[in-house]
């Protein structure tokens, strides 16, 4: 597949990008549009600015399939930091509470996860989320110091596996449905254990049928010649 210089038409397909920390998903879309002189670019599922990992960028006709891409289950690697709760439920927020977590054992954490945070669970969307209340995104209210009531939402956690237990940090992998807030999961686990907790780091490694293994790094993407972009695009047929 080549660019059609005469018509100016974009190529069509899905570009898997390993998003770096510090960029919003929209930043990535805007940068790719400029780098490759594209007209139609979108993405298939937002990642927080400080999170890294798999971002499906939709090019050309693939932008019509955003809902199909967003709807898949997700897999994340993260770090839960026990002993400190924050107002954003992650490391960017201000401390709101917490206590010494040294008495928490791996067994106690695994039991709490098994009993209360696996399977169908209800989560209250955090104030820093993009969920809208009366047409206004929660994060815009949060920037003004406002807090409003939010309706809990049903999500499903397939598995929460601990890969490293070194207090105060616990590294984990979680498989879950679309719409699961991993920051809220960490906050709620910390509350359940009685010491508080927040999300210290997050990396998405899976989204639907896509894996981070197929993603291009940001550095490699920036060095990619414009004419080579089509060779990196997955066809829309992968969604069938």
Image (cartoon, rainbow, N blue to C red):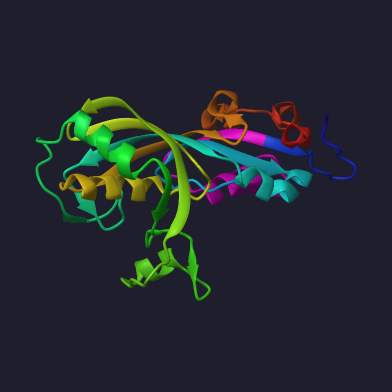
Which residue is depicted at the point 24% across and 35% down?
A: 109
The picture quadrant where one finds residue 152 is: bottom left
What percent of the width, then of the height, locates residue 113? 31, 39
- Residue nearest the observer in this picture, 194 or 69: 194
Q: Is residue 139 shown above or below 173? A: below
What percent of the width, then of the height, locates residue 92? 29, 50
What percent of the width, then of the height, locates residue 46? 53, 48
Q: Give the range drawn in magenta.
A: 15-43
* Residue 156 seen by the camera: yes
Which residue is depicted at the point 79% across and 38% down?
A: 11
Quadrant in the picture for the N terminus:
top right
Which residue is depicted at the point 19% across and 44% down?
A: 193
Which residue is depicted at the point 20% across and 34% down?
A: 108
Apparent side of residue 131 relative to residue 35 in the rendered image (left or right): left
What percent of the width, then of the height, locates residue 100? 9, 42
Apparent side of residue 229 relative to residue 83 in the rendered image (left or right): right
Which residue is situated farthest in the front direction here?
Answer: 115
Residue 75 within the segment the image draws in magenta: no
Which residue is situated farthest in the bottom direction here?
Answer: 134
Residue 24 within the segment the image draws in magenta: yes
* Residue 91 seen by the camera: no
Quadrant in the picture for the C terminus:
top right
Apparent side of residue 15 relative to residue 105 in the rendered image (left or right): right
Count of marks placed on residues: 0
């Amino acid at each position: 597949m080549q660019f059609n210089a005469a018509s100016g038409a974009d190529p069509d397909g899905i570009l898997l990008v390993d998003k770096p920390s510090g960029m919003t998903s929209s930043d990535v879309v805007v940068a790719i549009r400029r780098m490759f002189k594209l007209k139609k670019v979108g993405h298939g599922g937002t990642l927080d600015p400080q999170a890294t990992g798999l971002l499906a960028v939709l090019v050309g006709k693939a932008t019509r399939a955003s809902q199909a891409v967003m709807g898949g289950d997700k897999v994340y690697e993260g770090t839960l930091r026990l002993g400190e709760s924050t107002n954003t439920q992650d490391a960017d927020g201000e401390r709101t509470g917490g206590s010494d977590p040294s008495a928490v054992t791996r067994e106690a954490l695994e039991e709490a996860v098994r009993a209360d945070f696996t399977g169908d669970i209800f989560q209250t969307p955090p104030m820093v989320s993009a969920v809208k209340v009366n047409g206004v995104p929660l994060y815009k209210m949060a920037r003004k110091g406002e807090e409003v009531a939010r309706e809990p939402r049903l999500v499903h956690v397939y598995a929460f596996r601990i890969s490293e237990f070194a207090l105060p940090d616990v590294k984990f992998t979680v498989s879950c449905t679309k719409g699961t807030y991993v920051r809220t999961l960490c906050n709620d686990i910390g509350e359940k254990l009685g010491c508080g907790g927040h999300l210290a780091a997050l990396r998405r490694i899976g989204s639907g049928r896509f894996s981070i293994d197929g993603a291009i790094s940001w550095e490699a993407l920036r060095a990619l010649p414009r004419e080579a972009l089509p060779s990196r695009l997955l066809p829309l047929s992968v969604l069938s």
